[in-house]
Image (cartoon, rainbow, N blue to C red):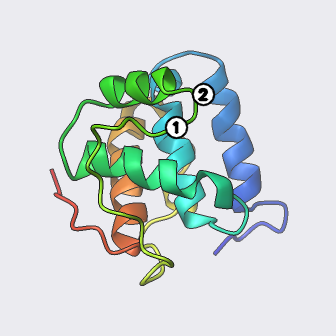
Amino acid sequence: MYSDADDSCAVRFAALLALDHSRREPWGSRHGQAFAAFALQHPATHAESLDRAWAVLTRIYVDGERPKRVFERLVSQRGGMPPEWNTPPRPGERIAAPSLTIADLGAFDASEYAERLDAWCRASLAAWGAHVSRE
């Protein structure tokens, strides 16, 4: 998957987190989506975050809710799930390998990042069996 021995999902995710935490756009406002996609693609590493990752990406990419609203609601619950979210339960395991990974995002170029992140998030959900719109 990686041509360079020093490259990996973890290395790329660390680089992406640095951009997210810089609070610059287009990365800063999309940190939650990036983390959720990564968590769903690395379930053993992020087991404690899987249900929240599933819920937020489902709210955004299946239900069509605005990301800002989704994360505001989640934060207001202090780690719990908003009671009004009728998100289907996350399946016990992925049904397929993701069709797109962090490796496919390239160098996180600002001009293409939002579109590529959306594709990554959709692929992460679809790998768990979600019926995701391709908008």
Is residue 72 visible in the rendered structure shown here? yes
* Identity of the residue furthest to the bottom in this view: 95
Identify the disc placed on residue 59: none
Please state the horizontal and vertical placement of residue 113, each as a whole percent of the image. 42, 38
Check the image and report above or below for 135 versus 41.
Answer: above
Check the image and report above or below for 118 versus 31.
Answer: below
Residue at 54% from the left image edge and 16% from the top image edge: 24
Q: Secondary structure at mark 2?
A: helix
| Earlier-in-chain disc, 1 versus 2 | 2
- The amino acid pointed to by label 1 is Gly
Task: Identify the residue position indicated by label 2 in the image.
Answer: 20
* Identity of the residue furthest to the top in this view: 23
Is residue 116 visible in the rendered structure shown here? no
Residue at 76% from the left image edge and 52% from the top image edge: 11
Q: Quadrant of residue 70?
A: top left
Q: CA distance from mark 1 to mark 2?
A: 23 Å
Q: Nearer the viewer, residue 135 or 49?
A: 49
Q: Quadrant of residue 114?
A: top left
Please state the horizontal and vertical placement of residue 63, each as a whole percent of the image. 19, 47
- The amino acid pointed to by label 2 is Asp
* Identity of the residue furthest to the right in this view: 6
Q: Secondary structure at mark 1?
A: loop
* Image quadrant in which the N terminus is located: bottom right
Side (left or right) of 89 relative to 16: left
Side (left or right) of 21 relative to 86: right
Mark 2: few/some/many CA within 10 Å (<14, 14-19, 20+): many
Residue at 40% from the left image edge and 72% from the top image edge: 128
Task: Identify the residue position indicated by label 1 in the image.
Answer: 80
Check the image and report above or below for 108 versus 43.
Answer: above
Please state the horizontal and vertical placement of residue 92, each as a whole percent of the image. 49, 77
Is disc 1 in contact with disc 2, using a CB cutoff of under 8 Å? no
